[in-house]
Image (cartoon, rainbow, N blue to C red):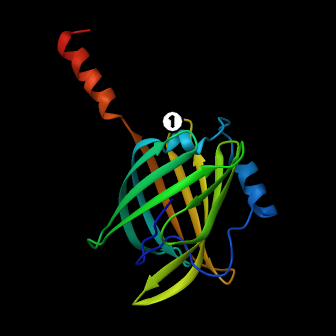
Amino acid sequence: MLREPITVLQPLHGAQSARPLGGNERTMSQGMSSYQEMFQLERFFAGRLKVWGVFQDRFGSVRRKFEADAQGIWDGATLTLLENFTYEDGQTEQRTWRIDKVGDTRYRGRADDVVGLAEGEVRDNALNWSYLFTLVVGGRSYTVRFNEWLFLQSDGILLNRTEVTKFGLRIGQVVSVFSRLPDMRDLGELEHRAAIGS
């Protein structure tokens, strides 16, 4: 759901498929889920969102910053999520996700630059989202894995920490924040009520 700041930091491409939650990841999810509202991907991402994030290399240095505007539509079976990214150097990027709910807590998604399927599982207020992506750097393509952990906070903010690896070795991470924006129809109603003093 994130695009990383390095040329195109997102899905991966390669022969592997998304992997399920591992032991360490389950421990992380259990240990960090202090807010107990169940996270519903289709509910959070339906509507307008704003995203702010940074890409850090494996040493923790910030290498790139980005912002994104997103719009999601849930039709009862599939979430279509359009993301428009703008990086601090002026580069722009667009991605469209189509995500299906395949169980009470499991999701499967696809996007043009994702190799195979992305897979995710919800645990309490956390979603683990994993997929392979083709990262383009200096005109060359690399297959990397994105392993995202998204945590819904009590104030409605969604925190995302994405580990980026190649051959099992960590090459960096993306840290980002998602905030839902008011629906324009809701804003129109509020303005109308204010105008008539109700």
Q: Amino acid at mark 1?
A: Asp
Counting the numbered discs, the total is 1
For mark 1, give the secondary structure. Answer: loop
Front residue (pair 24, 3) = 3
Q: With 41 as the anchor, is 123 left or right in this view? A: right
**Residue 16 visible at all:** yes
* Above/below status of 195 relative to 127: above
Extreme left residue here?
195
Task: Examine the image and state in which quarter residue 26 appears.
Answer: bottom right
Q: Nearer the viewer, residue 186 or 27?
A: 186
Image quadrant holding the C terminus, namely top left
Q: Residue at 72% of width from left, 67% of height from top?
A: 19
Rendering coords of residue 163 (x, y %): 60, 69
Q: Residue 116: x percent and y percent?
A: 61, 71
Asked whether residue 131 is in view, the answer is no
Looking at the image, residue 126 sits to the left or right of residue 186; the answer is right
Location of residue 172 (image quadrant): bottom right
Residue at the spot x=49%, y=58% of the render? Answer: 97
Mark 1 burial class by Cα count in 10 Å: few <14, some 14-19, many 20+? few
Instruction: Provide residue 30's location: percent of width, then percent of height.
Output: 75, 49
x, y percentage for residue 109? 58, 58
Against 23, residue 125 (above or below) is above
Q: Which residue is mark 1?
A: 155
**Residue at the image point whose x is 28% and y is 22% from the top:** 190
| Residue 13 as seen in the image, left or right of residue 69 | right
Q: Which residue reaches farthest right?
A: 23
Residue nearest the observer in this picture, 6 or 65 = 6
Q: Residue at x 62, y 66 (%)?
A: 117
